[in-house]
Image: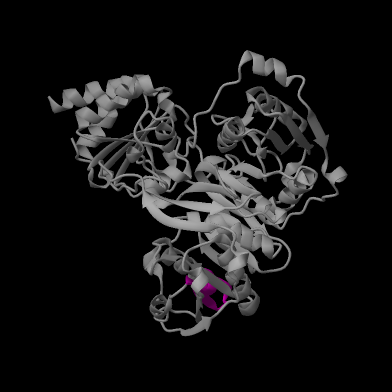
Amino acid sequence: MKIVVCIKQVPARDSQLRVDPSGAWIQETDLTHEINEPDAYALEEGLQLKEKHGGEVVVLCAGPAGAAQTIREALAKGADRAIHIEEEKLGGFDPLSLARLMAAALQAEKPDLVLTGLQSDDLGYGQTGVILAEVLGLPHATIIMQVEKQDGGIRVKRELEDGWFQHVEMPLPALLTIQSGINKLRYATLMGIKKAKSKEVKRLTGAELGIVPQASIRLERMYPPEKSKHTQMLDGTPKEAAAKLVEKLKFEVRIL
Amino acid sequence: MSVLAILEQRAGVWHRMSWETLAAAQQLGAELKQPVSAAVIGSDVSALGGELAGKQLDRVYTVEHELLKDYTPDGYTAALGQLIAAAKPRLVLFPHTYQVRDFAPKLATSRERVMVSDVVAHRVDGGELVLVRQLFQGKMNVDVRFQGDPPYFASVQAGAYRADKVTAGSAAVEKFKPELSAEAIRTKPQELFRESQRAVDLTAAEIIVSVGRGIKEAENIPVVQKLADVLGAELAASRPICDNGWLPMERQVGSSGQTVSPKLYLAVGISGAIQHLVGMKGAKTIVAINKDPEAPIFEVADYGIVGDLFQVVPALVEEIQKAKG
């Protein structure tokens, strides 16, 4: 099975975010980055499917030159090779033109299965995988918690709301968006890290792929959210803050 | 800008967010001075259509076909694509449900548009619609405007609009029969199921102590268990804790877990991603303990302590024991 896993590099989870002077995005300099968490699970699922059924895992990543680090890590974990769509200003691409960019890069690949995380931790549209499926003309299913290969295709377990699930069967090639927690993530081994250095990373640009950025939606202004409640912050040493909270729970919330 | 709300049902039962979406559509329609319609889709939705006929709407569409009995992204996209081509709405509004996440981006793509997903608020500025959505797991908000020609697509977040604001009235019901073929539906859905009977009913708990990533590792769970014990509370968790197997899935609060509204909810080391907030923001009192002063959980908290949970929680246990004598 030839599996393409789409991964994205995002600001690390505990980053302190500041709005940049444009007012429409965050200051990216000085931030550390990491693989988008659901994409890490998609990668792991791809690696496990390859281990079970043979084939190849190709990582596809659109992002600035700095995303090479995240790509290296994916190769160190066991991906066979990578395609890096190098674009410094990915923000100019809306999810549809981004999906077209990714589809163009996949044209020569003809994968059996395309995996993405269900959403990104930065923009959080939760759409790129589904849009990519439509652009590639593939059947898809989202928020997947299990993938089984069977005759003529795959059977997947979709997570629904409130603890419900559903199995869905579909032919290959297909695209799945993977939910966090579907599997247990592996760490890269020293051997893996060493091997990754000699693995192929194909670099392409939007211009080479003939896809121009499009913005059918415009992010106009970014700002920290307003509080929906008036929060009483209780300060002091841990002991002082704890004592203040107990006072509140006793006399305001009346629960103690 | 005529508004079309596409509502969700399963086996003849409304998804609770359908009414929130209808309320949002009516509000937008009023502010944009545009007519509002609603559509419901399935194999037999005439009863639901009848219910919508009692709301203040320009028109109700019942989109029916036997191939729409079970949800499939191909079937829904084809059927709703035809409805949109016929009804020509300028704005199509969805509830941001798991099902909508599965097909609406495909539907928008088939019309060469991009949906603005998970909208939390809106305003009208110079006759144009500005939508507000969250980024970076709720750490930032962004104002979004559509560019280019309609139709525009958007989905609204759970709890962003109030279902009880739906205005009653009367509307004509129009049957819409899409042309669908079984061959064009590539996925085969099977019956819905639950993993197991839930042994833990968090919805009945008066006090919940909930733990998130801040707990760092499974070995540290007793730190918060102790707090739950002294409070007589149920222990719950955000998704990553259950994903890691540190607590069973049945103790998960959030969009894929349980939705709770206890008297007191203590969020310990939980940053407050929207998937978690939708499951607990109905709690009467919320306490947040987190080392990051900018964690979104503080936006919904009544009381907040910024600090290291490994220092604050033991101190809290001690103070509660003292208070209880």
Q: Does the stretch in magenta take in B9?
A: no
Residue, far bottom = B172
Magenta segment boundaries in residue numbering = B28-42
Q: Position of residue A74 (x, y in %)?
A: 66, 28
Q: Position of residue A58 (x, y in %)?
A: 70, 35
Relative to B262, does residue B158 appear above or below in the rendering?
below
Nearest the viewer among A184 and B297 is: A184
Q: Is residue B39 left or right of residue A23?
A: left
Relative to A190, does residue B101 appear above or below in the rendering?
below
Q: Where on the picture, by quarter, is residue B23?
A: bottom left
Q: Is residue B261 left or right of residue A200?
A: left
Q: Does the stretch in magenta take in B39?
A: yes
Relative to B9, does residue A44 appear above or below in the rendering?
above
Q: Is residue A64 left or right of residue B250?
A: right
Q: Position of residue B182 (x, y in %)?
A: 58, 68
Q: Residue at x 32, y 26 (%)?
A: A241
Nearest the viewer among B201 and B319 is: B201
